[in-house]
Amino acid sequence: MTGAVRGSLWLFLVNLVGKAGQVAVTLVLAAFLTEEGLGLVALTVSLVNIGHVVQSMGVYDVISRTTLDPRRVAGTLLTLSVGTGIALAVVVTVCADALAHALDAPQAAPLIRLAALSLPFTAAGGVQLGLMHRDLDFRRRLVPDAGSALLGAAVTVVLASQQAGPVSLVVGLLVTAVALPALGVAVGVRVRPCWDRDAAAESVRWIAVVGPGALVAVLLVNVDYLVIGHVLGPEAVGVYSLAYRIAWVPYIVVAVVLGGVLFPLCAKLIRAGEADRVSAAAGRFTQAVLVVTGGLYAVTAAMADRVELFGARWSPAAVPLRLLCLYGLGLGLLHLWYQVLRAAGHARRYLALELTHLATLVVALAVVTRHGVVVVALTQAAVVCVLVPATWFALNRNGLAPPKLGRAVAATALAALCCLAAAGPVGAVFGPSLTGAVGEGLVLVLGYTAVVLLVDRRTVRELREVRR
């Protein structure tokens, strides 16, 4: 467990540095781009994200779980992933105009073509990260993962400040992709392309199970952009995108970090014949997501009106942001629990839950999207709130459910309500400036922490034990 905690801290730093760059990019783009410009960027990135997942389906899982020589497996996966990435880049480039017209955003075609060039590079970098992921070597991962993100963010900020428009983010995306494998080589992770029949057979078998789940997962977090763009147009996507990007940060910084450590940890426990310890590990990680992510989302929801600091034109993003905070917390729990199911060998059950989520969401969006982005955000939150108990029951049925969550849930809910109630008076004291927003945020974080400490000291003690 000590290695897992150390890995969590390094992966937290990786994501904090990388996502801090993304937050800075979001703020800069909100300041320099129109709603339509930000919408075009969001649609382009959504399409490329789907391509990233298609070319690297199951890479992390195969490398983490394999009993074969991991270097041979990685070389075989490099051949598969980069080859797929090149093919996808060609297809997307040729079909860029058709894709842009299907999204009712013909101006996005040049952006899509440029972004498609990133696919082979991210495929190569993903295999390098998979090897480091297997060994929980997140300290070395800091350089290629966070370093490439910072380089891309810096390029985007400079270009946006020079009024380059939506292309600024796409160029930054390409710089990030090229830098990722280059920095991986710089820290000593060199993977030679090769072809091993046994490794290929194992990879294909596993990808056939988890690959569709990975594709469904990326569709779940991008289908709303695509539907909004098709029904409401790029301007609506821009408003929704700002809210979504802000709400995405706690999920990435906390839930994805802990999930990234929990999967190899559970896989290692199962390989060692200690499957009975998986439930306890899942419980402590779940409590961390509830308490920490819950606090970040409570403060974000309480301060949602502050989006006007990016410009009065962004005020319609406040209500969707509050609703997406609930969605983000639920998605964080789902992400964590899916790692447990996959590590325990229940990939088909995980896929069934993901498909249920996607099918429910798509049907709901087809009905409600014409009513606006607020209703879309409400739908996202409602669907996730249905999936959370369903996933817990799936874990419980297999003896993997995290135990004793009642206190953590109660403490998080009470502390969040206190934050929401205090936001108005505290905000009035600090005023509408950027400095005032920072002061309000600090006070709300301290208030949330105090309530959790008073209500649920047992959970806090367990989190301290995990930290030690």
Image (cartoon, rainbow, N blue to C red):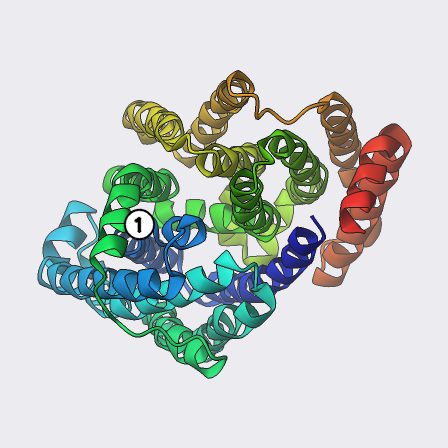
Using the image as rendered, state which of residue 13 and residue 305 is in the foreground.
13
Please say whether residue 229 is visible from this viewpoint: no
The residue at the far right in this view is 454
Using the image as rendered, state which of residue 141 and residue 273 is in the foreground.
273
Tell me: residue 333, above or below residue 92.
above
467 relative position to 382: left or right: right
User: Residue at left 63%, top 44%?
Assistant: 305
445 relative position to 330: left or right: right
Provide residue 181's location: percent of width, then percent of height: 38, 74
Tell me: residue 288, above or below residue 78.
above
Quadrant of res 210: top left
User: Residue at left 36%, top 44%?
Assistant: 236
Provide residue 443's location: percent of width, then percent of height: 83, 49
Using the image as rendered, state which of residue 238 and residue 345 is in the foreground.
345
Dot 1 surroundings within 10 Å: few (below 14), some, or many (20 or more)? many
* Numbered-mark total: 1
The residue at the far bottom in this view is 186
Provide residue 288's location: percent of width, then percent of height: 70, 40
Provide residue 380's location: percent of width, then percent of height: 44, 30
User: Mark 1 sits on what residue?
Assistant: 57
Using the image as rendered, state which of residue 256 and residue 8 is in the foreground.
8
37 relative position to 8: left or right: left
User: Residue at left 21%, top 52%?
Assistant: 105
What element does badge 1 sit on? loop
User: Residue at left 25%, top 40%?
Assistant: 208
Quadrant of res 213: top left
Please say whether residue 9 is visible from this viewpoint: yes
Tell me: residue 288, above or below residue 362.
below
Residue type, numbered disc 1: Met
